[in-house]
Image: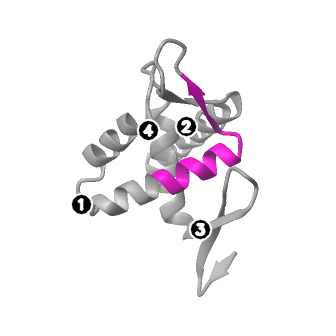
Amino acid sequence: MENGGNEMVSMLQVDGRKGEILSKQVYERWSRFILSTLTSEKDFTLNDLLEEAHRNFTGVKEHEVGWHVLQIKRDLEARGLIRVIAAPDLKRTFFIKLTRQGLTKINYEAQLQEWSETDAGRLSE
């Protein structure tokens, strides 16, 4: 989707309906943050993810951090890149986990970044 030269992303809701519309640049920045954060071995709850986002996005207003994390988390869940699972031993605690598809996406993007840096290094020689 284009909007005056800015490419836009139409997000999805978990129930399949259309969600919010964001610029692709903003969407990519936040989704990359969420996916890469979830690659660690730690079990992340939504609260943990929000706290990590507040630490990493210090120049962004507090309510905007929460809004972006929640909206893009829903979209990533609807796209099958992450899933929310109940903690086995804790009532009302849910962990956010990468799916196999989400891990593949983050690994693919890391590989592209590595190739890009390698090519840039060769061009500067």
* Mark 4, residue position: 46
Q: Are marks 1 and 2 in contact (CB under 8 Å)?
A: no
CA neighbours of label 4 inside 10 A, class few (<14), some (14 to 19), many (20+): some
Is the residue 30 above or below the residue 93 in the image? below
What is the quadrant of the C terminus in the image? top left
Left or right of residue 49, residue 119 in this image:
right
2 or 3: mark nearer the eye: 3
Q: Are marks 3 and 1 in contact (CB under 8 Å)?
A: no
Amino acid on which disc 4 is placed:
Leu
Helix, strand or loop for disc 3: strand
CA neighbours of label 2 inside 10 A, class few (<14), some (14 to 19), many (20+): few
Q: Residue at x 49, y 48 (%)?
A: 120
3 or 1: mark nearer the eye: 3
* Mark 3, residue position: 20
Q: Residue at x 61, y 73 (%)?
A: 7
CA neighbours of label 3 inside 10 A, class few (<14), some (14 to 19), many (20+): few
* Mark 2, residue position: 110
Residue 62 percent across, percent down from the top left: 27, 58
**Upstream in sequence: badge 3 or badge 4:** 3
Is the residue 68 above or below the residue 10 in the image? above
**Upstream in sequence: badge 2 or badge 3:** 3
Residue at mark 1 to residue at mark 2: CA–CA distance: 25 Å
Helix, strand or loop for disc 1: loop
How many badges with numbers are in the image?
Answer: 4
Instruction: Give the residues drawn in magenta, as a range.
Output: 70-86
Q: Are marks 3 and 4 in contact (CB under 8 Å)?
A: no
In terms of depth relative to the viewer, which is nearer, 1 or 47? 47
Residue at mark 2 to residue at mark 4: CA–CA distance: 24 Å
In terms of depth relative to the viewer, which is nearer, 83 or 122? 83
* Mark 1, residue position: 59
Q: Is residue 112 rendered magenta in the image?
A: no
Residue 19 percent across, percent down from the top left: 64, 65
